[in-house]
């Protein structure tokens, strides 16, 4: 069932959204992207004449009530975005009366799902090494099912529009779907767009296909890198992982970030790329700083010859040009992870070059997908988010989808 061919008139819909928005110390939202992303789905239900029950998590309260992570803080912002009053249920597991009283066109926001350990379904206060852990895990899974059943009892229809948590088998993202038949559970518009974007990148490839993987660690990206080796024409590896590769090949990297236990892995990636005919593009020069600070003294040096006491903090001019050339000639582009310490304004040039080249390629007909928290922060910082094909809201979910893993939140709807 899809959102477009379902009529919500007279129905109550419980919608899992990702309203885990950043708040300042006064509880004010600093970025409402996730709320805006869910609006098409929520408004479709209301426009049909349905009643809306919104559920989400916020932060990591670890199964305990924490007022600083209460969704009550964002109730007014959600109401303003929807253009109607939003009621609030201060306990998500005891909202049956409030849900039953909902009339068509009305909205109920449930309190943070993760105030209950049953949402994540992990035993609390017991170590995995404890002999009683397996029993505790079994009991928690049963409790999780009951929690999901309670949530399901509030509504006639279940909609999952939270791609950011689709890689978790939580009560609200996957288990709850078991209590609805195939005609009464569906993906929201945001989820459909995310699934389509990933599918475009992995299965509807127009070549050349270039993947840009940045960030500090090879270890967190190895699954994706290995999966992409069979798909891409060009693989650009940048950011902090540059120096693990430089050192693996006998380079001198000063104080640059390096995973000493991944040097063999770096050499294996180089070998595999050669074997598979993938053009592996690594940085040849970098902008090094004499301290980890925006106002550090800087010098440009080879990535494999960083002076003692200095650390590589951004891609150098020759590297930037090499990256840009490959990207501009591409027709399918995936970007995950920055090329340097982009949070510091003086070390944004590498990431900015990548972003500009992606925008240029997109304008020339390429399909570009930007995903992962830091890459999204990059394109937002540079004001370029609307000039790439798609900006993904999912960090971990996107990476697992690219790795080729089945996402529980999607499988629960599609019956995979």
Image (cartoon, rainbow, N blue to C red):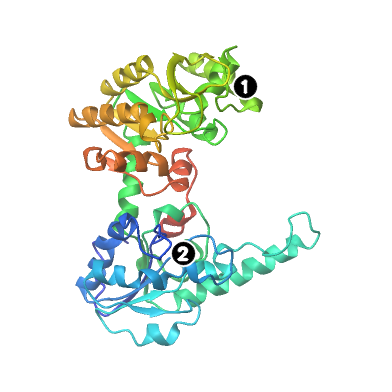
Q: Secondary structure at mark 1?
A: helix
Could you classify mark 2 by the number of other residues whose Cα lies within 10 Å: few (under 14), some (14-19), or many (20 or more)?
many
Relative to 380, residue 266 above or below: above
Cα–Cα gap, marks 2 and 1: 38 Å
Q: Nearer the viewer, residue 251 or 27?
A: 27
Mark 2–mark 1 contact, CB under 8 Å?
Answer: no
The residue singled out by tag 1 in the image is 263
Q: Nearer the viewer, residue 102 or 387?
A: 387
Q: What is the x, y in percent for residue 290?
A: 50, 24
Identify the residue shown where x is 38% and y is 39%: 375
Which image quadrant for residue 161? Answer: bottom left
Identify the residue shown where x is 49% and y is 54%: 408
Relative to 58, residue 306 above or below: above
Relative to 84, residue 182 above or below: above
> Is residue 125 in view?
yes
Q: Nearer the viewer, residue 148 or 327?
A: 327
Identify the residue shown where x is 51% and y is 27%: 241
The residue singled out by tag 2 in the image is 57
> Is residue 372 in view?
no
């Amino acid at each position: 069932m899809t959102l477009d061919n379902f009529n919500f008139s007279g129905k109550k819909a419980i919608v899992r959204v990702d309203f885990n928005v950043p708040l300042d110390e006064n509880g004010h939202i600093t970025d409402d992207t996730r709320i805006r992303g869910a609006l098409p789905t929520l408004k479709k239900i209301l426009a049909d004449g349905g009643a809306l029950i919104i559920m989400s998590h916020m932060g990591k309260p670890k199964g305990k009530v924490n007022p600083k992570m209460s969704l009550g803080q964002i109730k007014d912002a959600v109401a303003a975005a929807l253009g109607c009053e939003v009621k609030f249920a201060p306990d998500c597991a005891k909202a049956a009366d409030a849900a039953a009283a909902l009339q068509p066109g009305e909205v109920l926001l449930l309190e943070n799902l993760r105030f209950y350990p049953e949402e994540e379904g992990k035993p609390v206060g017991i170590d995995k090494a404890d002999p009683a852990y397996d029993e505790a895990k079994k009991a928690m899974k049963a409790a999780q099912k009951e929690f999901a059943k309670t949530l399901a009892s509030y509504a006639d229809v279940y909609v999952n529009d939270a791609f950011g948590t689709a890689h978790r088998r939580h009560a609200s993202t996957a288990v709850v779907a078991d209590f609805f038949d195939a005609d009464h559970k569906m993906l929201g518009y945001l989820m459909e767009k995310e699934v389509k974007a990933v599918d475009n990148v992995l299965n509807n490839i127009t070549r050349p296909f270039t993947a840009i993987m940045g960030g500090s660690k090879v270890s967190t990206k190895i699954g994706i890198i290995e999966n992409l080796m069979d798909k891409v024409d060009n693989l650009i590896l940048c950011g902090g992982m540059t120096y693990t590769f430089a050192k693996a090949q006998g380079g001198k990297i000063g104080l640059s970030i390096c995973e000493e236990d991944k040097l063999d892995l770096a050499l294996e990636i180089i070998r595999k790329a050669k074997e598979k005919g993938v053009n592996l593009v690594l940085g040849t020069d970098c902008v090094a700083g004499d301290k980890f600070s925006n106002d550090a003294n800087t010098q440009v040096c080879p990535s494999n010859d960083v002076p003692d006491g200095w650390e590589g903090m951004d891609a150098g001019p020759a590297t930037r040009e090499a990256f840009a050339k490959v990207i501009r000639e591409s027709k399918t582009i995936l970007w995950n992870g920055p090329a340097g310490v982009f949070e510091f304004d003086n070390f944004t040039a590498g990431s900015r070059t990548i972003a500009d080249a992606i925008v240029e390629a997109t304008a020339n007909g390429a399909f570009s997908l930007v995903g992962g928290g830091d890459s999204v922060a990059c394109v937002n910082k540079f004001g370029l988010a609307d000039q790439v094909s798609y900006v993904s809201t999912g960090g971990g979910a996107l990476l697992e989808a690219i790795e080729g893993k089945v996402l529980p939140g999607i499988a629960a709807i599609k019956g995979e």
